[in-house]
Image: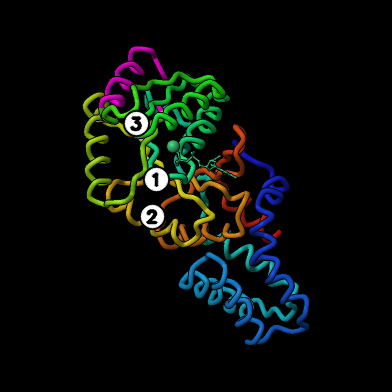
Amino acid sequence: MKILVEKLRHKLAKTKNGFVAKIAETLKLRTKIDQDLIDDIEDILIESDIGVDVSEKIIERLSEAIRVQQIDDPYQIMGLLQGIISDILGKSNLEKSLYSNEHSPQVILIVGVNGVGKTTTIGKLANNFRKEKKKVMMIAGDTFRAAAIEQLTIWSERAKSIIHKHLAGSDPSAVIYDGLNSAKNRDVDVVLIDTAGRLHNKVNLMNELSKINRTIKKVIPDAPHETLLVLDASTGQNAISQAKIFNGIVTIDGIALTKLDGTAKGGIVIGIKEELDIPVKLIGLGEGIDDLKDFDSEDFAAALFG
Ligand SMILES: Nc1nc2c(ncn2[C@@H]2O[C@H](COP(=O)(O)OP(=O)(O)O)[C@@H](O)[C@H]2O)c(=O)[nH]1
Ligand SMILES: [Mg+2]
């Protein structure tokens, strides 16, 4: 589900008004490009949530481009930054599409810490698959709170999907095992598995996720076909630390980056790409059912700098 650049720009307004506007402001005040200006831009990048190493890399490439292309008008720097950032983000469109139907059912495991937006993302993702005429089942693998199961149930109704759930307090692996068997019997195209995100103890998390993975493989040996890590953009660099922890425990195939609409820390997308090299596949741009979009690096850079 693509989003128009103009709409994306509107959704990313806080990030654009953050570091991007600050750079634009700095450029306006200058008539020539000198080291002072480059240093100011570097400071702004570092203060945003892009990360220090990545900021330095961007500045190196910017200086190189200015030198090679013999640019002397500060006005042209925005365009250069757009190109560099778009290039760093790479061609996300070439990543294997989530919506490809190589597997039946296609099993997607959703992981991430509490509150990042896992359950909401499942609701929106189900809706996206429904638009592709897919039959979707959600499995309520976060069994620790009754409210979590209720929340997923509401999303299943909104997204016209099947929900498979057990009572609160039951074993997550049991509900996943039953759910997957039921999905096979009911010719479901896509299964979205919700999980709890209790990160208070790395060993527990590791045990829990390994057990869930073993259970999934008992029913469908080549599943999960996709493990999606949900990260909250508004947590900035903390999101990168979470990704490192999860990636050390399970193989993360892609990231769904939520809450980009409400934060000035959207530069985190660039940090994720550089520090983790895990593709951001989906972006959350609001709480509504239509607010989960495919990530397109060129559009993202264009929305911020264009
Ligand atoms: N503004 C905004 N809010 C979001 C987004 N995604 C999730 N949320 C909100 O974040 C809160 C936590 O989401 P939830 O799905 O319950 O997180 P979970 O604990 O990981 O399952 C809820 O209030 C959601 O409405 C998003 O992309 N934008
Ligand atoms: Mg949840």
Q: Amino acid at mark 2?
A: Gln
Q: Secondary structure at mark 3?
A: loop
Residue behind label 1 places its C-beta within 8 angstroms of ligand 1: yes
Q: Amino acid at mark 3?
A: Thr
Q: Work out whether 23 lies above or below 258.
A: below
The residue that mark 3 highlights is 143
Distance Cα–Cα, label 3 vs label 1: 15 Å
Left or right: residue 54 versus residue 78 is left
Q: In percent of the image, x 25 and y 40: which residue is there?
A: 208
Magenta range is 174-191
For marks 1 and 2 on the same chain, the one whose residue lies earlier in the sequence: 1
The residue that mark 1 highlights is 112
Q: Where is residue 180, by image quadrant? A: top left
Left or right: residue 53 versus residue 37 is left
Q: In percent of the image, x 39 and y 47: which residue is there?
A: 113
Could you tell me residue 306's position as x and y percent?
A: 71, 59
Q: In percent of the image, x 50 and y 73: which residue is there?
A: 57
Q: Amino acid at mark 1?
A: Gly
